[in-house]
Image (spheres, rainbow, N blue to C red):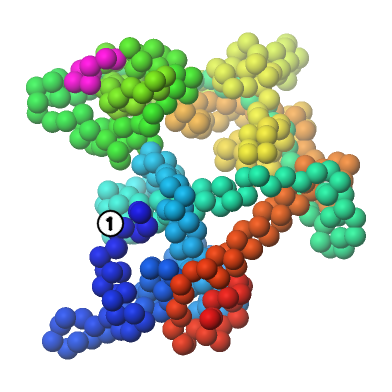
Amino acid sequence: MRLLHSIKNRRTLLLSLSLGWLMSVSAQDHVVDEVIWVVGDEPILKSDVEVTRIQAAMEGQRWKGDPDCAIPEQLAVQKLFLHQAAIDSIEVTESEISQQIEGRIDYMVRQIGSREKLEEYRKQSLSQIRTSMHDDLRDQLMIQRMKESLVKDIQVTPAEVRRYFKDLPQDSIPFVPTEVEVQIISQTPKISVEEINRVKDELRDYTDRVNRGETSFQTLARLYSEDPGSRRSGGEMDYVGRGVLDPAFAAVAFNLTDPKKISKIVESEFGFHIIQLVDKRGDKIKVRHILRKPVVADSAITASLARLDSIAADIREGKFTFEDGASVISDDKDTRMNRGLMANRSENGQTSRFQMQDLPPEVAKAVDTLKVGEISQPFQMINERGKTVCVIAKLKSRTEGHKATITEDFQVMKDVVLAKRRADKLHQWVVDKIKNTYIRINDNYRNCDFEYEGWVK
């Protein structure tokens, strides 16, 4: 079982002291921590509660009721899900964890201004920040995966949705935020031959260094790869089928036969790679790779923005439509075949409607003040593949925020009912799990008003 293994030794010691105090080994014998709950064989420490409290305050999180009661209860519930995830052999990969870490770091960098400022604020290097985030994010992913497993079979019918909302008070009917449909035309700035050659030379140097035995492929991947999903694991990806990979990448990866050899340089839609075989299993392959992305020159970005400005002017003058331009001129393959219309994909399916917070931030900012049918000024952004692109956007439609109606917003109402059914299922699961789990609580918490019944036995 991989439950919170990073602090297993400390917690084994604490458990041996039951709900007592952990004393330091210094001459003064100062108290340094206290076990306040035990859930199964896992303790909750007073320090765990304080760390959670500080993190929540930094993120602006509010608690229902008394935080001194709500925080340890939340930690206890997390342990129940983690324990069940271990029993059910639910796993998350290092690649998934790395993607979450890099996403969090990118968000913090955008908030604080630069990676250097982030390191200064946290008083840690980026490597130390990644390490400190790893176990918590792994546990969060496992909890999420466990919850998804418990509610995956829950469905609701149209009749259930209608019954649920039939007698619902007006002030309880959900409010549907403003939704928009957006079309885009995208241009990818041209990268110079010199820059491409520079990246290729770097990759050739990495290959030579591995072949000479100076270092390992994994070490170079950790140091230099620009793929956030695999960098931390030495460039290693999980077993995947051919259809999941970029076609150019797959063509080379699936032809590798010798794990000791490194592939030729491969250009994909993400950048340039070198690949090393790890293993083959049926129609799936496991490889490690190093990704390097050429840097786009400012002059190339300026040229692309100028071209898009000219295209927008021609559309406004009626020389051709935005839709025709998107179908012929745009470099964005995800929208080109749909006349530039962006698609909002979620677990509930695909739609062309977006709430503003679901759009890429640059697109949302560009269309926020547009009237329906208007075209934005050109702007640059980083697309889903991590490439710099230049874009013009057209606001195709806007539906102002309103109270949901069964005829216009059935999917919204269905999602509300489905979310409630899932929440009820998870709540009952926790209550039942509490009944069958060994739990001990410090006397100071026995009078708390808990969300879940059964903690105090």
Q: Indicate whether residue 221 is drawn in magenta.
A: no
Is 39 positioned to the left or the right of 453 in the image? left
Horizontal side, residue 266 vs residue 375: left or right: left
Specify whether residue 258 is painted magenta. Answer: yes
> 433 above or below 312?
below
Q: Residue at x 50, y 84 (%)?
A: 445
* Residue 397 drawn above or below residue 145: above
Q: Name the spot of residue 39 as percent of width and height, x first.
A: 44, 70
Q: What x and y, as percent, mark residue 290?
A: 29, 27
The residue to which callout 1 is attached is: 124
Residue 62 image-quadrant placement: bottom right
The quarter of the picture where residue 172 lies is bottom right
**Residue at image coords 33%, 84%:** 20
The residue at the point 44 percent across, 84 percent down is 442
Q: Position of residue 188 (x, y in %)?
A: 49, 20
**Dot 1 amino acid type:** Gln
Can residue 243 be seen by looking at this rendering?
A: yes
Q: Nearer the viewer, residue 26 or 455?
A: 455
Give whichever of 102, 435 is nearer the camera.
435
> Which SS class for mark 1?
loop
Q: Nearer the viewer, residue 237 or 182?
A: 237
Count the labels in the image. Answer: 1
Note whether residue 309 is visible: no
| Segment tinted magenta in the rendering | 256-262
* Helix, strand or loop for the magenta stretch, by majority: loop
Give left or right: position of 186 versus 19.
right
In percent of the image, x 62 and y 45: which residue is there? 152
Estimate how packed mark 1 is, as few (under 14), some (14 to 19) or many (20 or more) residues with alpha carbons within 10 Å.
few
Q: Residue 41: x percent and y percent?
A: 38, 68
